[in-house]
Amino acid sequence: MSKKIILLLASILSVGTFAATIEIGFENEQYDDKGTNNYNRSDVFMPYISGSFNPLDGSKLKIDFKYMYQDQYGKERAEGTNARFKTQRDRFEMFASGYSYKNGDFAFNPKVGFRYEQWS
């Protein structure tokens, strides 16, 4: 995971600009669903690094990026079994924005981008 983060930061800094913001954090989701969910208990821990920068001086163009590593673990809901599971995946996101349309209280600010998830 650390090699991918270093590679991501090096590629961003190599374009000749510095990121305006860098954020390091994590998301955590906990489930305990006895209903129709496929899993009785499933916890997800997702550390990430994200940031944004303006590649052109004086332009409204903004690039947002995020790398997230998801580590999910839990117990399968199957009757009479104590089977446990663990999934790991990498997620890369990159979005571009900059166009803004305003008309009174209405504002339209679209983003375009992609998300890639790699399952192990």
Image (cartoon, helix red, strand yellow):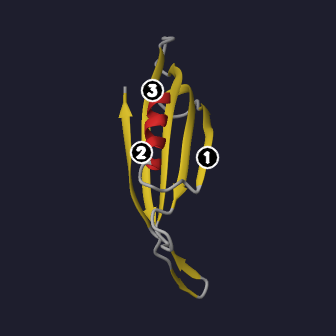
Q: Position of residue 47 (x, y in %)?
A: 57, 35
Q: Of 114 and 16, which appears nearest the observer?
A: 16
Image mark for residue 113: none
- SS at circle 3: strand
- Residue closest to the far bottom: 104
Image vertical order of residue 55 relative to residue 117, above or below: below
Cα–Cα gap, marks 1 and 3: 22 Å
Q: Position of residue 71 (x, y in %)?
A: 51, 27
Cα–Cα gap, marks 3 and 2: 24 Å
Q: Of 42 and 15, which appears nearest the observer?
A: 15
Residue at image position (49%, 72%) is: 60
Q: Which of the two labelled residues, at mark 2 and mark 1, occupies the earlier sequence position?
A: 2
Which residue bears the numbered disc 3? Answer: 88
Residue at image position (51%, 27%) is: 72
Instruction: Locate the C terminus and report the quarter of the image it occupies.
Output: top left
Cα–Cα gap, marks 2 and 1: 17 Å
Q: 10 Å neighbourhood of mark 3: few (<14), some, or many (≥20)?
A: some
Give the amino acid type for the residue marked by disc 1 in the picture: Glu
- SS at circle 2: helix
Image vertical order of residue 30 relative to residue 8, above or below: above
Give the amino acid type for the residue marked by disc 3 in the picture: Gln
Q: Residue 55: in sight, yes or no? A: yes
State which mark lies toward you, 3 or 2.
Answer: 2
Discs 1, 3 touching: Cβ within 8 Å: no
Give the amino acid type for the residue marked by disc 2 in the picture: Ser
**Left or right side of 6 for 47:** right
Which residue bears the numbered disc 1? Answer: 23
Q: Which of the two labelled residues, at mark 3 and mark 2, occupies the earlier sequence position?
A: 2
Which residue bears the numbered disc 2? Answer: 11
Q: Position of residue 110 (x, y in %)?
A: 45, 69
State which mark lies toward you, 1 or 3.
Answer: 1
- Residue closest to the far front: 16
